[in-house]
Image (tube, rainbow, N blue to C red):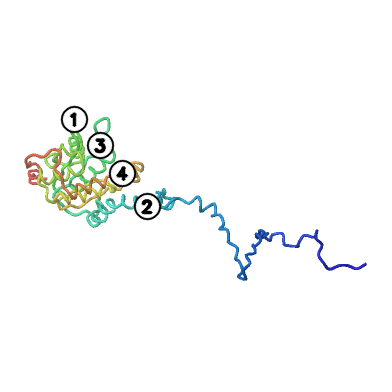
Amino acid sequence: MTVSNEPSEYAEPSRRPDAAVAPEEAPVPDTGSDTPTVPTAVPPHPPAAASRRRPAGRWRPPGVRAWSLLLLVAAVAGLVPYAWLNATTLDQRTGAAEARHRPVAIVLGAGLRDDGTPTTLLARRLDIAARLYRAKLVDAVLVSGDNSVAAYNEPDAMRDYLAAAGVPRRKVVADYAGFSTWETCTRARRIFGVEAASVVTQNFHLPRAVALCSRAGIDTRGVGDSSYSVRTTATVYGYVREVPAAFPALYQALLRPDPQFLGPGEPDVREALAAPR
């Protein structure tokens, strides 16, 4: 039997399984011209992704990377005032053991217990002031606190504590309108005439206190208390609180607003400095 090499009309052309099947071309009409006719190509449909593309100019919400960048910028900006307070007062802060002589120690209030005695943090500040007085590193102490209501009298409680620690009452002056760090500093300069002082507070509060007293016109050195081992939670909270507190401090340092109560000068600090030890 003779085998024909002609393909059968029923045979399917062989191709790879993944080969694309070319679409059938339409027959080219006979125009009677010798010039070949080129079939007109049908433009393909646009991809589905392109058809869903947003029109130009429409607002697109920021992505995760943009939000992360914005949060980073906000965090850095939020730390700028706090960093400024720390950097500008670095060489003005020390501990009690390294303190140098200043005429006056300014002790800022830090609250009273229910029985009217100083809180632990305030007592530690007063202990440093008494130590400076006994070492003859200060000649008088200005205690400044809140006495806005009769039932709450920080300055008198501070004065009583110092007297019990061996500081004569004639050497202690009370400021009853020290409602904030700035008001304590500016009243010390403008009301009590303090020109040079050691400001005594906890380490977390010291940069702000030194910066504000310096801006109030006082030649200031800060003497700090490391309270972490005694009041850990309160100390950590104090450091955290100083970050937002740096913003009003920056405003006060730049604009130096008047305190809530401002009156004529008082001679109490001058008289305390002149009194015998």
Measuring from the top left, give residue 213's x and y in whole percent.
Answer: 18, 49
Q: Earlier in the sequence, mark 4 or mark 3?
A: 3
Nearer the observer, 37 or 274: 37
Q: Residue furthest front?
A: 32
Which residue is identified by label 4? Answer: 241
- Mark number displayed over residue 72: 2
Measuring from the top left, give residue 1's x and y in whole percent.
Answer: 93, 67
Q: Earlier in the sequence, mark 4 or mark 1?
A: 1
CA separation, marks 1 and 2? Answer: 44 Å
Disc nearest the viewer among 4 and 3: 4
Find numbered disc 3 in the image and state the secondary structure of the residue it sits on: loop
What's the amino acid at mark 2? Leu
- Check disc 1: other Cα within 10 Å, few if <14, some if 14-19, many if 20+: few
What's the amino acid at mark 3? Gly
Nearer the observer, 10 or 58: 10
The answer to whether the residue labelled 2 contacts the one labelled 4, judged by CB atoms less than 8 Å apart, is no
What's the amino acid at mark 4? Arg
Which residue is identified by label 3? Answer: 111
Measuring from the top left, give residue 91's x and y in whole percent.
Answer: 23, 57
Which residue is identified by label 1? Answer: 149
Nearer the observer, 48 or 223: 48
